[in-house]
Amino acid sequence: MGDVQALLQSVFGFPGFRGVQGQVIDRVMAGRHTLAVMPTGAGKSLCYQLPAVARDGLCVVISPLIALMHDQLRSALAVGIRAATLTSADDNRRETIDRLRAGALDLLYVAPERAATPQFRELIAEARINLFAIDEAHCVSEWGHDFRPDYRLLRPLLDSFPHVPRLALTATADAHTRADILVQLGLPEDGMIIAGFDRPNIRYAISPRDGAARQIADLVRQTPGAGIVYAPSRAGTEKLAAQLAATGRPVRVYHAGLSPELRQANQAAFVASEDMVMVATIAFGMGIDKPDVRFVAHAALPRSIEAYYQETGRAGRDGAPAAAHLFWGAEDFVRARQRLDEVEPDRRASEQARLAALSGLVETGDCRRMVLLRHFGEQPAGPCGNCDNCLTPPARVDATELARKLLSAVFRTGQTYGAGYVEEILLGRSTARSQMNGHDSLSVFGIVDAADAPLIRPLTRALMLREALVTTEHGGLMLGAQARPILKGEQPVEIALPPRRTRKRGGAAVP
Ligand code: ADP
Ligand code: ZN
């Protein structure tokens, strides 16, 4: 119908393509099946919206969430695309179907469960379909972090229109998931286009939690502009929001417990604001078009590297400097491992790998961006110079001996006590409890020099991260699967310490 370049300007008002958009659109226009892996903010919607306008007929977009569909519908309508959603939340479904039959629609958003019905198949058989766009395509894979069984039902629909090109889109897919998406959706291996994942303007930082409210308040004070703080629970967002009010910035909350009206109002206020702090659960952010978010903070561990990347990716879409700061606690990993026990056996291995990747990112003393990009299959050229570890390299301390002492103290005291008690034993601090337990006479009592005291807590965290230590159901410490090789001296333990801590200590830090 129209020249792609001309439409890009006349319909969307963009001077040119960004990144791989042109490449993806070329393939789609040529009628070839494609998987586009593009980071959040890279402009995935254009990749189907433009062909939808440029080619005769209807583009069907499969999308997992009604809220997401309605956001995208708004942006499509805003540039004058003849678009509609067909969901249980729409009371104009009759009208939409009439428009579809009359050929008066370019774009139709629909959820996978509806798309998979025979009724829907019959309906669109009457229209001329020019493209199937499968948004959030990682949902089709069990390897993906958001598996949606409904996505598996799409294949028969797609196969019954063999000449209609398929465009699968996702922001977050590791190599496994990508390969699986190709198989599940019947796409050719050479049909994958992967955009660079790097977001060079985002400065990544990851720190242990030590008074999260204060740490995040400090970040807010240091970072002008709007920001998002992710907290793990509804109650957590409310509490944190109250605490952040002291920064003097406007603060709002967003979580699934609020009324739709209030959520909508808070979201609109955030989008319009230049300095608001939004404290939210992960429900917030999908489909929000706010390019000038200056920081994203996590008050707890995200679910996966993919989730972390997607959530932090909401910062700095305008290309100006932005910060992403994650605050984690060892208990986050404990909880994540407990959740692991609850997943179905056939998914456990992939969930385990996901958690291991995440702890690798948290634990590393090397460039965070390199860890992130490698996770997404890229080969970064070198350290980025724009993450916490690049900017203030942590001192690496060989803590192998200390780790053996700590693990034996846990073992000798019966694998029931918490970190505080074990620390007292190691440092030889006699208490009523240690006397009563007869632990004052253990060989590990007082075995650690006072100068090493500041290392005990970070080391405990590091050992928990590695599963050399795990927690009992009562919160005590016990030896984990990885304890043995350390105790036997087969496995060295090195920990990366934030610079402030090590300066106090001097000596043993390895440069
Ligand atoms: P994604 O779905 O990949 O996260 P979107 O499709 O929501 O990204 O696009 C992100 C932002 O980039 C939107 O504000 C969009 O208008 C803008 N955008 C997309 N393509 C271009 C382009 N070629 N030039 C300029 N801005 C673009
Ligand atoms: Zn770096």
Image (tube, rainbow, N blue to C red):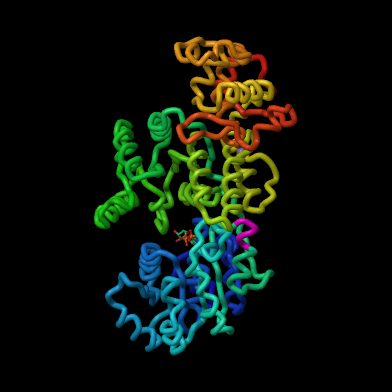
Residues 278 and 351: in front is: 351
All told, the count of numbered labels is 0
Seen in the picture, residue 79 relative to 362 is either above or below; the reply is below
- Asked which quadrant contains residue 158, the reply is bottom right
Magenta-highlighted stretch: main secondary structure?
A: helix
Seen in the picture, residue 166 relative to 324 is either above or below; the reply is below
Query: What are the residue bounds of the magenta stretch?
Result: 174-178
User: Quick one: which residue is furthest to the right in this view?
Assistant: 490
Q: Quadrant of the C terminus?
A: top right
Q: Is 102 displayed left or right of 195 in the figure?
A: left
- Asked which quadrant contains residue 383, the reply is top right
Residue at x 49%, y 47% (from the top left corner) = 339
Residue at x 51%, y 72% (from the top left corner) = 133
Seen in the picture, residue 313 relative to 5 is either above or below; the reply is above
The answer to whether residue 390 is seen in the rendering is no
Residue 29, image x and y in percent?
A: 58, 77
Residue 137, image x and y in percent?
A: 53, 65
Residue 466, image x and y in percent?
A: 61, 36
Q: Is 160 displayed left or right of 408 in the figure?
A: left
Residues 184 and 201: in front is: 184
The quarter of the rendering in which ligand 2 is drawn is: top right
Residue at x 57%, y 78% (from the top left corner) = 165
Residue 198, image x and y in percent?
A: 59, 50
Q: Is residue 176 magenta?
A: yes
Q: Is residue 364 magenta?
A: no
- Asked which quadrant contains residue 445, the reply is top right
The answer to whether residue 147 is seen in the rendering is yes
